[in-house]
Image: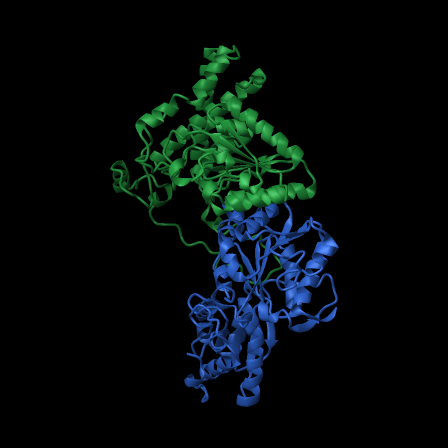
Amino acid sequence: MSSLPEPDVAREWLQTMVLIRRFEERAGEMYARAKVGGFLHLSIGEEATIVGSARALRQSDYLISTYRSHGHAIVRGTPPENVMAELFGKVDGCSGGRGGSMHMFDLSRRFMGGYGIVGGNLPIAAGIGLACDYRGTDEVTLCTFGDGASNQGTFGETLNLAALWRLPVVFMVTNNQFGMGTSLRRHSAVTDLQRKGESLGVPGLRCDGMDVLDTHRVLGDAVQRVRQERRPVLVEAVTYRFRGHSMADPEQYRSKEEVAHWRERDPIPAFGDQLVHEGIIDEAQRAQIDTEAVQRVDDAVAFAEASPFPAPETLYDDVYVLDPLISGRYSTTTTPPPAPSHPSELDGSEEIPHQITTALAAGEDASAGDRAPAGEDAA
Amino acid sequence: MGEMRYREALNAALREELMRDDRVLLMGEDIGVFGGAFKVTDGLLEEFGEQRIRDTPISENTIVGIGVGAAMVGLRPVVELMTINFSLLAFDQIVNHAAHIHYMFGGQVSVPLVVRMPQGAGHQLGPTHSHCLEALFLHVPGLLVAVPSTAADAHGLLKTAIRDENPVIFIEHESLYGTRGEVPDDPEHLVDFGRARIAREGSDVTIVGISRMAITAERAAATLASEHGVSAEVIDPRTLRPLDLDSIITSVHKTNRCVTVEEGWPHSGVGANLAALITEQAFDDLDAPVLRVTGADIPMPYSKPLEDISYPHELQIVDAALKALNLAGADGARARP
């Protein structure tokens, strides 16, 4: 059993976990209302893993994540307003509306991005670690990825190289039990994921990712060890996502009983109970934390609604860092095509493909334009 | 520096930029102790040490990705891949990350990364070591693509590539490493991207040669002049992105005919792209269709006689130019199948 931090710190952890939960629930609702496009991967159930690990870092350390990264942006301090605006594809989004749910980014807070390619962020994390090592700083990079990513070539390649070059990176595999719809025991020959780095020279640790205190304790040890020893560590955070892989997931691959079993270990009520039990907050304050989170998310939605879409004339901005001295052509054209004649194509609010949601409800494969209603557990 | 080999010019460019900017570091398979598979990095480990000249494991996708990450936070990595075919293992990091990160994250970071690699047939390395794939990289918005054909351009373009803020795919040619040329004795010798080299002036037909084919096209132009009385203008774009289309259009305006030459495959190739651009933007100047001379549309064979006829030579370029001019002597039977 890990001991509690200072009361102010403990309160902030709970506040952030609740904020992420409420944000994700609302993002799901906004998706069902077609305010959010593309895929939406929610981290509901994984809040203790997110907050416990990120709070083991200094502000000057780097965090790099996956396509399930709204919570990672928020925990680093990116205002929920800018995260929601990114989901809405608005100009005030934290990636300017260019990235969407899978590609959050906030350089000013050293949140080095969400990445849509499974395992794609591991080499980048090693590169950031290399830069820190090269400059002789004591900064550490925390690289999170899922259990599915531990089967990618970049996992083995990067862990080997990070160990060989003694790069200051904490690799954290967020084992939420599934690579999309394929369970751990069906996708990995070795299910004790903390051991997957052993043959590559990377020692492993494990934490209870449903327990923010245990997560923080283990990650704190890992970060300190990496900072001092300048060599990588692999941490397995054992957790569970309560929602589907994305909103377009009929969840045929797991039983309701299994989900219910894990929900009994929901990290937010568990940590809230603990704080009440220890007298750090009372029930009224606990309710207040939730009210404030809901209000903040309301504000984020209002902000995202009010923020404009990026202007068509910005379509070609930031493809290149342009050199004004270059006379040659970077692109065949930089003139945006005219806007579509039907406004609904822009706001997306009128054309929810009913046949796809129906197919999802029936458990059929829907490979394109996936969209599904919010889960029944929003709230 | 006077005359030097293409590989020595690259080596000099790397050395000069390593000396000029301590953010520059080199990574690649066998670039250090071994000195580089083609000896481009020879001697740099001894001069700059292991922190800056880094031998890597054989992990192409990851070493490019490490370059991306290091570039995002301010270093200037130069990654060497042993051949362009191996870059296919790194295509994820090159396309999904190096090319897209600046745009995908709303311009918050840039990726000043150079990925160097040689390409080209002629050494009997068969179907996995001999291809010319510049068209694949040209296809991708966010990447710059350089294809130097001379020692001077190899030197000046590589220095510019290292100083540029964008990810650069820097494509060398295996058959050019030993070729010699004059290189200016100037540590600030920079060749601008997006500025073509007019390798030979002429008035009857424009020949655009890509990578090594710029050199082959120059020889073809000499033959066209001496044996056929044809004045060919040879253009080496030097970079495919950005592209000096203006110089090509200006030339076509003068000659009214254009032949493109590349070693890569015909479908969706560099020549196909140039033909489309010229047709779109200079149709009224054309007296004949833009003709393409390309590598054969096959995986590269090992056997020498087959390999020899799998990529363009002077003969095919001469024939194509004569055909564009509708001159007798454009003998289809002489062209490769």
Where residue B196 sits, quadrant-wise, is bottom right
Q: Quadrant of the N terminus of chain B?
A: bottom right
For residue B201, side relative to residue A301 (left or right):
right
Q: Is residue A41 found left or right of B83 in the rendered image?
A: left
Q: Is residue A60 above or below residue A318?
A: above
Left/right of residue B234 with respect to residue B32 in the rendered view: left
Quarter of the picture holding the C terminus of chain B:
bottom left
> Going 60% across and 52% down the picture, which residue do you hit?
B113
Residue B117 horizontal/vertical position (percent):
57, 61
Q: Is residue A8 above or below residue A61?
A: above
| Residue A206 is at least partly visible in this image | yes
Name the spot of residue B89 as percent of width and height, x first: 50, 55
The reply to whether residue A60 is in sight is: no
Number of callouts: 0
Q: Is residue A16 above or below residue A306?
A: above
Identity of the residue drawn at 30% across and 40% down: A352
Q: Nearer the viewer, residue B88 or A281?
A: B88
Chain drawn green in the picture? A
| Tint of chain B | blue
| Quadrant hosting residue B336 | bottom left
- The figure's colour scheme reads by chain
